[in-house]
Amino acid sequence: MKQAISTANVGEILRLLRISFDLSISDLSDKTKISKSYISEIEKGIKTPSEKIIKNYSTGLNIPEKILNDLLNNYSQMHLPYQQLLLDMLKTISKL
């Protein structure tokens, strides 16, 4: 069963992941097959990504979908400084 993702900071987390992979929005769009405008709206918190979009991120960033969902669920409600949030996420990803 899929876990529901809390949406409080999902866009910020996805933006930090994109930045941590050193990708522009255009690069991420190419890898995920998600339009640049939609990625921008997600990162700004205007849109909430569907399960399909999360799967596209997972595939495009080469992160297992379960790990990406766990990151989104674990960090979307936290209010950590960006540096700490980024370090914690990178530690998780580096264990793959």
Image: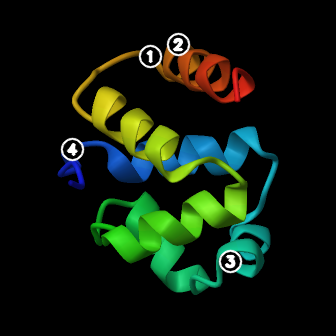
Q: Position of residue 36 (x, y in %)?
A: 60, 81
Give the residue at the far front of this rendering.
1
User: What residue is pinned by disc 3?
Assistant: 29
- Dot 1 alpha-carbon crowd within 10 angstroms: few under 14, some 14 to 19, many 20 or more: few
Helix, strand or loop under label 4: loop
* Location of residue 12 (image quadrant): top left
Q: Position of residue 72 (x, y in %)?
A: 37, 41
- Rounded to the nearest whole Å, what is the CA distance between mark 3 and mark 1? 27 Å
Q: Position of residue 28 (x, y in %)?
A: 71, 68
Given contact means CB atoms under 8 Å apart, are the residues at marks 2 and 1 in contact?
A: yes
- At 70% from the left and 21% from the top, the residue drawn is 95
Pick whichever, 21 or 58, lies toward us.
Answer: 58
Looking at the image, residue 29 lies above or below residue 73: below
Q: Which amino acid lies under the numbered mark 4 shown in the image of this protein?
A: Ala
Q: Which amino acid lies under the numbered mark 3 shown in the image of this protein?
A: Ser
Mark toward the start of the polypeptide (3 vs 1): 3
Given contact means CB atoms under 8 Å apart, are the residues at marks 4 and 1 in contact?
A: no
Label number found at residue 26: none
- Dot 2 alpha-carbon crowd within 10 angstroms: few under 14, some 14 to 19, many 20 or more: few
Q: Which amino acid lies under the numbered mark 2 shown in the image of this protein?
A: Gln
Question: In the image, is 72 to the left or to the right of 36?
Answer: left
Pick whichever, 17 or 41, lies toward us.
Answer: 17
User: Can you tell which of label 4 and label 1 is closer to the viewer?
Assistant: 4
Q: Which amino acid lies under the numbered mark 1 shown in the image of this protein?
A: Pro
User: What residue is pinned by disc 2?
Assistant: 84
User: What residue is pinned by disc 1?
Assistant: 81
Pick whichever, 52 or 39, lies toward us.
Answer: 52
Looking at the image, residue 4 lies above or below residue 93: below
- Rounded to the nearest whole Å, what is the CA distance between mark 4 and mark 1? 15 Å
Helix, strand or loop under label 3: helix
